Image (spheres, grey):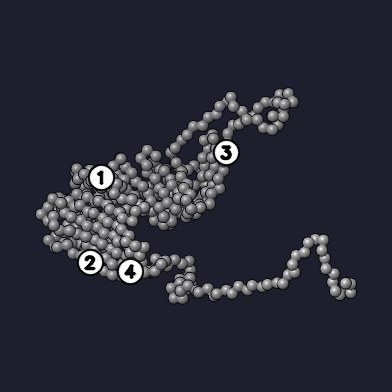
Amino acid sequence: KEGTVFKIPLNDSESFGDNSFIHFLSPEEKLARLTGETRELREITGVELNFDLDITQDALVEIVIDKNSGSSIRGRGEGNLLVEINTNGKFNMYGDIAVFEGVYNFIYGGLVQKEFIVQPGGTLSWDGEPLQAQVDLVALYLTQANPSVLLDTPINRSIPVEVGINLTGVLEKPDPIFDIKFPNVSSAIKSELEYRLDDNESREFQALSVVTTGAFMSDLRLNQEALYGTLSERASSLINSIFSDSDSKFQVGLDYKLGENNPEYQTDDRLGVTLSTKLSDRVLINGKVGVPIGGVSETVIAGDVQIDFLLNEEGSLTMKMFNRENSIRNFGEEIGYTQGLGIAYNVDFDTFKELIEKVFKGKKEKEPQIEEITTEETAPKLPSFMTFKNKSTGNN
């Protein structure tokens, strides 16, 4: 049911013991003691428990991969699990879970901490040992980075980047396959980037570079910028945890990104302030303002803002207004912006017929039901010692 948390500590171990001077007597043993009969006490060798679990989307499943670092997978899904446990060290799991949503919390070296969004459709299958579960998951890490080191014509602008990781094989040691995608870029730049990242070795190297440092790297540019980028991002995360409250309607965040100094391009450090607020139940505002630091253009402010208006009580009809900084900017060009206005309608359906009914017919109005009230004339209840005779009997 809702609120259930099912946690699997994969590398945790505990020891159990008992006190031999304490014994619990059964009714037969108590009777034997009263009659003076001598009976040998039965020693309990262990306790075995079997759990047949029906996992629903209301339950949160968390699998701790590495307790020392804190890396874990948590999410929601559906499936069935049979768990067998006893006090002698037995721990077996059987069944499958289909993942609908989740987060892979990746922690490395005490400095790198990233959250990958698990995509729907993944599976986890157990057939005995929990560590030997078969995993098939796809997770995405969303960020922005400058890919100029991979381009013949560099740009001085960060673009959205999606780092994907496909985890397959044994859960204890899965085989990761990395992928990098570039949404919202021109076809020419996208084609050149895909060509540079065609082989698995280059793709894996750049994916790990983006995840750990927030930037693409050339094979020769392994310097202190990688460490500084990770430290600054970690510091920003700590500051955000102080100012942000998940239960509050007003959230503020800080984002500090180091600039890059290369022969091909040069960018300044940038301090970003993010704001998320809920003016009412119908109006939502999300925005970000970035100010260059350490350069000659400290007065230049780059800002993104999006306002959502919920047009109905269900929240399915939404009007969106946005002002967004352009993803691509050539060298020497001023910062450009794109504005837009749109309406979005969201509807949940299981069949195409249900979709047509919800979109075109709307909700069927329920016919008013008239409740019929019948009254029966009943004679007043008499005491048990009083009766009336029927007139048809002829007796008075």
Q: Which numbered tag is attached to residue 79? A: none
Q: Which residue is mark 1?
A: 235
Count neighbours of disc 3 (C-alpha within 10 A) and say few if under 14, some if 14 to 19, many if 20 or more.
Answer: few
Q: Considering only order in the chain, which callout, 3 or 2, is on the residue closer to the N terminus?
A: 3
Q: Amino acid at mark 4?
A: Met
Task: Give the labeled residue for mark 2.
Answer: 338
Q: Residue at x 41, y 67 (%)?
A: 313
Instruction: Tell me how far mark 4 sits from mark 3, CA to CA.
Output: 57 Å
Q: Mark 4 sits on what residue?
A: 319
Circle 2 crowding by C-alpha within 10 Å: few under 14, some 14–19, many from 20: few
> Looking at the image, which is closer to me, 7 or 2?
2
| Helix, strand or loop status at disc 4 | strand
- On the rendered structure, is 170 left or right of 231? right
The residue at 13%/55% (across/down) is 298
Counting residues from the start of the chain, the first of labels 2 and 1 encountered is: 1
Question: Mark 2 touching mark 3, by CB under 8 A?
Answer: no
Which of the two labelled residues, at mark 2 and mark 4, occupies the earlier sequence position?
A: 4
Which is closer to the viewer, label 2 or label 4?
A: 4
SS assignment at label 2: strand
Secondary structure beneath label 1:
helix
Q: Residue 187: x percent and y percent? A: 25, 64
